[in-house]
Structure formats: C-alpha cells, structure tokens
Image: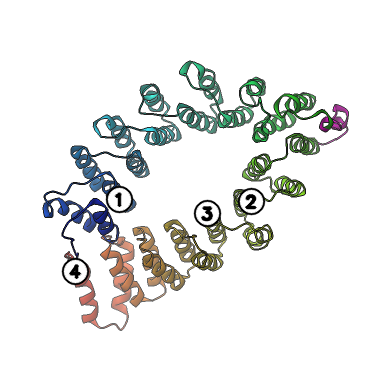
Amino acid sequence: MKSIIIRWPKLLNPTQLSQIIRVQKNPLTALRLFNEATSRYPKYRHNGPVYATMIDILADSGRVSEMKDLIHQMKRDSCQLRDSIFVTAITTYAKFGLLDDAVSLFRNLPRFNCVNWTQSFNTLLQIMVRESDFQTAHELYMDNSTGWEVKNQTRSINLFIEILCRNNHSDLALDIFQEMNNMCCYPDRDTYKVLMRGLCQDKRLNEATHVLYSMFWRISQKGSGEDIVVYRTLLEALCDNGHLEEAVQLLGKVLRKGLKTPKQRLQGFTLTRFLQIENVEGIKGLINEALIKGAVPSLVSYSAMAIDLYSQGRIDDANRVFDEMRGQGFSPSVYMYEAKLEALCREGRADAAVQVIGEEMLDDNCVPTATTYKIMVKGLCDEGKSMAGIRYLDKMAKQVGCVADKEIYNVLVDGLCRESRFVEACKVFEKMLGHRYWPSAAAFNRLIGGLCSEGRSYEAVLWLEEMASQGNCPEVSVWNSLVQIVCSESIEFYASAEMLRRLTTPSEV
C-alpha cells in the first residue's frame, strides 16, 4: 500500500487534530496519529471534542479494546467531557455484549471530568431493562435518582415504565407511577401514554380508568388535543373487551373534562346512537370521530392522532384523520407523512409509499427530509427493489441541505447484495467512500464474496485492497473464495503475488 503522508501544522490545536484523524481510513492509523500528537507538540493537550472524535472512530469500527484503553487515558487526562462520549461507549459495549463493562464505566463516571450524566444514565437504564436485568436497572436508578448529575427524572422514569410495559410488567410500571410524587417528580403526557398502553395490553382496565381520571386534573386541565392518543387507547380497549356502555359513558367524561368540548359539539354523540351500531369496529370508528371533532382543531391534535394510528398499522383510520384535517384547512406535516410511509413499508406496500412521496407530498408542498428518504430506501430494499432506492439517493444529492448518512449507504449496499446486484453495489460503495463514510467489515465481506461468486476477480481484488487499507481482514470463507478464483482464472501470477504482498505489508504513515 502507498504510505500516507501527513502534513503536520507548525502549531496544533484539537480541532486540527480532529480533522486529521477523521479522514483516516484505518482507525488504528487514526489512533496512532492521535497519540503521536502529544509527543510531536509538547505543549499540546487533548480536549473533550477530540477525544469524542477518536472514541466515535473506534466505536464505529468495532475496536472495543482500543476504545477501552483510550477511555482510561481520557480519565487520566482529566479534561472536561460531554455526556455524549459515554453514551457512545456504553452503546458500543452493549452492542458487543459487554454489559458489565457498560455498567462499570457508568459507575466510574465520578472519576471523569463530566458534570452531567443524564444521557448516559437513560441509555444504560434502557439497555438494562431491555436485557431484562431489572435488578441492575433498579440499583442504578436508586443510586442515581437523587443526585444532581442526572437531570429530568421524569424522562428516566418514562423509559423505565415504557420498557416494563413492553415486557408485560404493567403492574410494576403502575407501582413506579404511583411513587413519582414521593420521588419529587411528576408525570407528563408521555408517562400517561406509555402507561395507559401497557395497562390496556395487560387488560388492567380498572387501573387504567383510574389513571385516566388522574390525568384529567394533572395534564388535561386546558383541554389539549395531544391527549387524544391516551384517551383513545383506553376507550378502544374497553370496546375490545366488551365494555361498550362503559366506553361510551367514559367518552362523555373525556369530551367534557378532558378535551373541554363545547356543548354544541357534544350533540349527536349520544348513548343511543352508539348502541345502534352492531359491530365493535363501527363503535370504535364513531369514538375516533367524536375525539377528533370534540378537540379544538389544531395541527398538534391531528398529528398526534394520525401518527399514533399509523404506528399501530391502522392506515385507513389514519388516512381519515388526514382527510378531516385537510377539510379544516390544515396541511399534514412531514412527520405525519414519515409515519405514513413507515406504516406502508411495514406492510410491504413500498409502491404505495412511492406514490405518497411523489404525489401527495408534492401536492401539499411538503419537502422530504433525509429521514423521509431513509424510510423509503429501507422499505424498497426490504422488498427487493434496491434499484429504485438508488434513485432516492440521487435525489438527495440534488436537494440542498439533504445529505445521505452512512446508514442509508449501508442499507442500499446490503439490499443490492441480497439481490446479487454486486456491480451496482460497487458503485454505491464508491459514492460512500467519496463522502468519507467507511464501510464495515461485514459490508466488505458481503461485496467481495458476491463478486467472487460471479467471477469478477479484478473488482474483488480491488475491494479487498480497500478493505485492508482500512485495517480490516476478510472472513476465511471470503478469502478462500478469492484465492480460488484468482488461481483458477488466467491472471498473471506475478500480478497476484504483488497484490498479496501489498495486502500483507504494513502501511507507513
């Protein structure tokens, strides 16, 4: 490989060093330059941002051992650090199954020069509950719930409640909710939303009704349309479990006390009208209509309702909310369209999603964002239509302020390789490298293995060399495939030998 020449400045600052290491393909080269800086410039000292850059590089490339050593070095340097550095490290440890290291790092945060641990705490708490390690999660919460380093206790409790409910432990979530006052923190709208859904899924409808009543005087005193999502969850659960009259009676209280609906809007939503409907779905549809029309019309209320319906896969009901809000003179937001696209793609209807982004959003003058395109690319690739996904990559390149990130490129490459479109995957790889996004070792292995399976030895060798330049080695099966195809084809032996020599010779900086 060619040696890499680094032009060191006369005076070095951390921002310059961040720029130097960020453009290195090989993370080990970046780490060597990072450590070399202090010996080249005796007066230079690393700061928090340059450490963050180096940690991101090592974490992204899966160099866990080197990242762990750098964290110890960072502790010795005692420079001021942001919480986001530890979020990256904790997430990386969890990704590789090193949960004990993640917990140990968090418990040692007092030894670092970091004054706010909120993001790290929430991240680790979520990981522990997701892994069903409730004891460790409880210990972490009890040890850190009263300290000044962790802000916004409500957000932390909401995470705890949400994941407990996902694991069918709504009884434990309700206990935590009832103890919030004693913890000197108070539930917000998200607290009620996640707890209500958990209680209803576990069919704890009596407790859910009492939670709703407490919401009337704590959250809903001004009649916000955002609360519709919480109300609808309980009302539909009552209908699904055969409590139709109770649901209708509770709807009246919701309209009067929760949404503060004017009396003239209450006309037409009588018990008799609901009981005339024979099927449960019809009653639920009328309840949704009552909630929409009972709330003060606003983009916030329509958006909350539509996004929640799309998240549950109820596309037709959400589309009716779209029609209702347009009739009231409101234009759907990009977040509503993104929820719609996700719902369509989850159901395998990427073609319908293409029409939404190409026609509906255009008619509403709604400009797609990078997130919008990412949803579309993933949906198309999941359905084996990666070539259509490439067109959205091209559209992003032409749209000002809309930049494709590394994840979009990885999704496209993975989709193209699954469809055996390895030549097109090579072109996406080239664009990816042009934006200085370094592919993972797994992506290289998929591409090189696919090229070998199609007999494209020349391209396979080129990408193997690129892979080696980034400090990665191919899997044994990929290497064997490449050796076999190189030896079987009429490729000059000396050219192959020279290639192998370059790949096995350490590069110099």
Residue at (59% x, 49% y) in the render: 335
Q: Is residue 184 left or right of residue 239?
A: left
Image marks 1 and 4: residues in contact by CB distance under 8 Å: no
Q: Bounds of the magenta span? A: 265-279
Q: Secondary structure at mark 1?
A: helix
Does residue 266 belong to the magenta stretch? yes
Q: CA distance from mark 3 to mark 1?
A: 24 Å
Q: CA distance from mark 1 to mark 4?
A: 23 Å
Q: Please, is residue 386 above or below residue 240 in the view? A: below
Q: Which residue is mark 4?
A: 3
Residue 293 appears in the rendering: yes
What residue does disc 2 label?
340
The percent coordinates of residue 44 (x first, y second) are 16, 49
Label 4 amino acid? Ser
Q: Name the residue type under label 2.
A: Lys
Nearer to us in this view, 381 or 116 = 116
Q: Amino acid at mark 3?
A: Thr
**Disc number lying in front (1 or 2):** 1
**Residue at mark 3:** 371
Q: Earlier in the sequence, mark 2 or mark 4?
A: 4
**Percent position (x, y) of residue 145?**
40, 23
Callouts 3 and 1 close, C-beta under 8 Å: no
Is residue 63 visible in the rendered structure shown here? no
* Secondary element at image label 4: loop
Q: Nearer the viewer, mark 1 or mark 4?
A: 1
